[in-house]
Image (tube, rainbow, N blue to C red):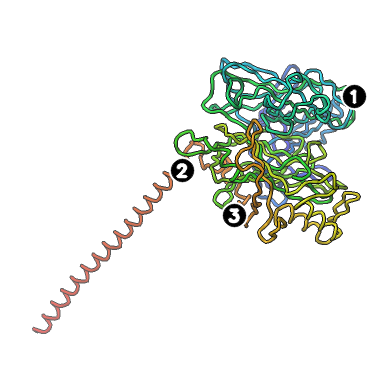
Amino acid sequence: VIGWVPSNNPNNFIIKNYKGNSNGVDEFNDQSYIEPIEGWKEDIDGTMMTYIRFKKDMFPELDDGVDIKIGTTKVLWAYRDGEMTSNDEPIYHGRSCIDTPGNVNGCRHIESMNLLQGESAEVPLPDDAEDWDVFMPDVIVPDDSTTYYCSLLELPTPDEKHHVVQIDPIITEENIGIVHHMLLYACPESMIDPQYVGTGTPCDTMSENMPGVFCRGGVTFYGWAIGGKSFYFPENAGLDVGGNEWDTIKYVLLETHYDNPNNRDDIVDSSGLKLWHTPTLRQYSAAIMQIGMGASPDSLFIPSGIERAVNYGYCNTECLDPGINGTDIDGSGDRVFAFANNLHTHLLGRQVVLRHIRDGKELRPLDMNLAYDFDYQQMTPFNQEVEIFPGDELIVECVYDSSERDSITYGGEGTYDEMCLSFLLVYPKPKLALCITSYLGYYDIENQQWTEDLGRFFEEAAMNGYYNASNNVYDIEIDGALEFYQDFATGNIFTNHDDEGAERVQYCLDSQYGALPGDNSRLPVLRSDIEYDAFDNDDYYICDDNQGGGDDESGFDWNGWYVYVVASLIGVLLIALVVYVIMKFKASTAKGNEKYHRVLSQENKNNNNN
């Protein structure tokens, strides 16, 4: 889309739809997919600014058009100085705004955003809200390309319970782009050594520098990643802090991921998160349910050279049901309401979907990102809350591209390791805080071999020539190698009964890291179109204004139950009316025939008498 306010006609503006080519841009013949709204120029502190507003079709029906993918959109924006008339053609904008900030002719830049779902709507803070900064001051960032820095910090601890209702990122200005993501892990007092509160160290050295602190990688209190903005909780929910309940969290481990590709040694950082909390409790307490695959080699591994490697993490009903037990809020049964989600992988992630299964049928996915961007992760609000009931099951589907790697990538905390997680915000607060799965088996260091399903996979892969343990390479170029891996990753083979599919180990923990019913159990894998009927992704945005709710701009719910009842009654009345008209017609016809026969009979009598 290119637009300008012509110097020879400042009361008008030009906006057009273009397509790129190797030498520039070509104007689309069909301009009906873009709707101009307004354009104007305005002097802002001595700089003449140009503003143009327009609407554009997200899914244009053009042979050479480009659809906006569900999830992250990379928006390339550019400008060029200089006057343009209504007869001019666009001129090349120039170089990068970042690389050449002094370029006066113009520049370009890329910004990631979620055009289809956006960010959480701002909710005004109550008058009694207070702020609490969770950060580690003056961290000297190591000159490594990737650093995870862990700080043990206090949460606000008022005597009475408060609700966190808004969370803002606090990023040291000169470190924007270096601070990649921040996670707050809940730290029960039983899992920390209080003497280390207020201290920090690179996470890999915690065992030496912060012994006795064991909450990293566990239950997540909140997560932020690069590109994310402030998050506003809905008006009826907030996160608990303070008070003296059994699950009160007083401490958190702040894990900050620094991305330092140039190995700089002069970075000092004080980034963190600002928690806005209020003593005026909202109707419900909220919490995060962490769902997916464990961050370990026995949970996730991806051979090199695969453009589309699909893996799954599960939260089965055997874990979910006891995890949401006791959440009944109105006498209609246990359930939680999901209102936002954050999908998470590392560098190889390309697509992530949080799937929702009920009674053997997949419902509309809770969250979907088909253009996942490691550099833009955020808590995405839902347009409508989604109810999760006992008996439901959740699946995190992660699609990776390992075509540029030359060895197996395993699950883990490092940037070049991989993850497959979903952080689902729900209310009322359930017991369940962590629901993840792993393969059957582990790597036995003493005997230097994998066990159970993992052992069988690598053993058979080596026998077939797919896997070379000496250099940790799984060669997908060999016939059958890719299919063998994908069958294993999707659960089609192993666990001693191949025809019935495989099993996974399910882990279920509460916010205090206590085991819930269903923890450490072996459960069958849920396979698409075998254990459940899959959802058609093409229907994801069939009602894009409200995620399938069917409301129009007036707020009327066209999919409400009463609409169907009224429509059914109208249908019945129409059928009754048709039947009535037919019967009246038949009755009228019968009377006419009777009269006709009487007249005909009388004429016959008269003829006979004559």
- In the displayed structure image, the side of residue 240 where residue 140 appears, left or right: right
The amino acid beneath tag 2 is Gly
Residue 492 % position (x, y): 70, 57
Point out the image quarter for the C terminus.
Answer: bottom left
Q: Name the residue under label 3.
A: 533
Element type where label 2 sits in the image = loop
Q: Do the residues labelled 3 and 2 touch (CB within 8 Å)?
A: no
Q: Name the residue under label 2.
A: 560
CA distance separating discs 3 and 1: 53 Å
> Quick one: 596 or 247, which is closer to the camera?
247
Instruction: Give the residue drawn at x 54%, y 19%.
Output: 280
> Quick one: 525 or 111, which is closer to the camera?
525
Instruction: Give the residue drawn at x 84%, y 26%.
Output: 101
The amino acid beneath tag 1 is Asp
Q: Nearer the viewer, mark 1 or mark 2?
A: 1
The amino acid beneath tag 3 is Asp
CA distance separating discs 1 and 2: 60 Å
Instruction: Examine the image and state in which quarter residue 31 appears.
Output: top right
From what the image shows, is residue 415 above or below residue 172?
below
Element type where label 1 sits in the image = loop
| Mark seen at residue 374 | none
| Mark seen at residue 265 | 1
Instruction: Give the residue drawn at x 52%, y 35%.
Output: 326
Residue 409 % position (x, y): 82, 45
